[in-house]
Image (cartoon, rainbow, N blue to C red):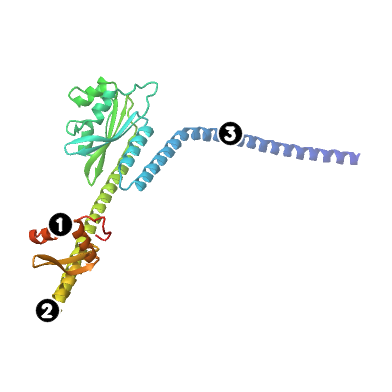
Amino acid sequence: MADDAATVEQLRAELRLARDQYTAASQEVATAQAAIAALRGQKADLVDEVQRLRPALSEALEQQTANAEVLRVIATSRADVQPVLDTIAERAARLCNTYYGSVVRIEGAEFRVVASFVLPPSGTEQALPPSFFTTIHDARIPIAGSFAGRAMTERRTVQIPDIAALSDAEYPRLRASSLGQSITRTFLATPLVRDGTAIGAIILRRQEVRPFTEREIALLETFADQAVIAIENARLFEELEQRNAELQESNRQVTEALEQQTATAEVLRVIASSPTDSTTVLEAISSAAARLTGSDGATVLQLIDERQTVVAAYGDSVAATAAVARSQPGWHTALVTDGGVPCLPRTPHDPHT
């Protein structure tokens, strides 16, 4: 009996231990299930956050790609600003989701379009009429009284959310052309500013009423900064090329003057050293004349007893003089009597003439 009681007590103790372990395990399972539920909720939140951020990330990537493309064009078109302006007009129109983007430059009291890009119309947009390109692209528009002119004058970005909301007195030309042809309802202009002075602007248009967001405005201002850099680079490159050309011309003139002075000094030295030897002096003169003019040779003639006589020659001039005399008789006489400086072509009789 005692053994049976001990066995029962032992079983009861094991049962209690098993029950406690089960309870602890159940609590752990419940905790794990709660953690799983929490993780599922966090996962759902993360998925929602990713879905929410995906458009923004895509837009940021597009902007970075566009900026990189513009910078690449700037780097490869230092002397030609047109490819940069064309790229900026296209990227601005595409990234800001507008049908038309343009870059204008100031010329005196007016401005004109120097680059533009037109997106094909969507299902809700109308194709641009031919008169739009005639009016916008071929015209020089006065800065005063124009909306783009206001952005350039005030050197800040300006926007018209709805042109139809303007009064008849506000920008009448823009209002009439835009509403009359149903080509623009929302208008945005950002100035190109260099050293505190406006030199142009980037303009975007929308056919529907849809104001540009702060992100789109900031992007357009970035493009404006890049356009100014490209324009300044092209201007500096052009100035550098012009200065290099001027320097080369100056060096050429200095070299030519130095050669002339050297030749003159050489002739004077020969005169001083040979005061009674005219032949040596004349030969030095013919040699200097040939070198300075890049000629194959030079001849000095003297009229003696009404006959032309070669008194000094350099290079192949003796043979050349004889050939010219055979092919063009009388030219010596014209040269001596008239005092002119004829320039005769090579003759077929002698390759040295």
- Residue 231: where, in percent of width, then height? 28, 45
For marks 1 and 2 on the same chain, the one whose residue lies earlier in the sequence: 2
Residue type indicated by callout 2:
Thr
- Residue 141: where, in percent of width, then height? 20, 32
The label shown at residue 104 is none
Name the element at disc 3. Answer: helix
Q: Is residue 49 above or below residue 262?
A: above
In this rendering, which labeled residue sits more in front, label 2 or label 3? 2
Please give left or right for residue 326 compared with residue 115 in the image.
Answer: left
Residue behind mark 2: 276
For marks 2 and 3 on the same chain, the one whose residue lies earlier in the sequence: 3
Please count the marks in the image. Answer: 3
Residue type indicated by callout 3:
Arg
Q: Between residues 31 and 67, which one lies in front from this camera angle?
A: 67
Q: Between residues 6 and 334, which one lies in front from this camera angle?
A: 334
Q: Residue at x 38, y 34 (%)?
A: 95
Residue behind mark 3: 40
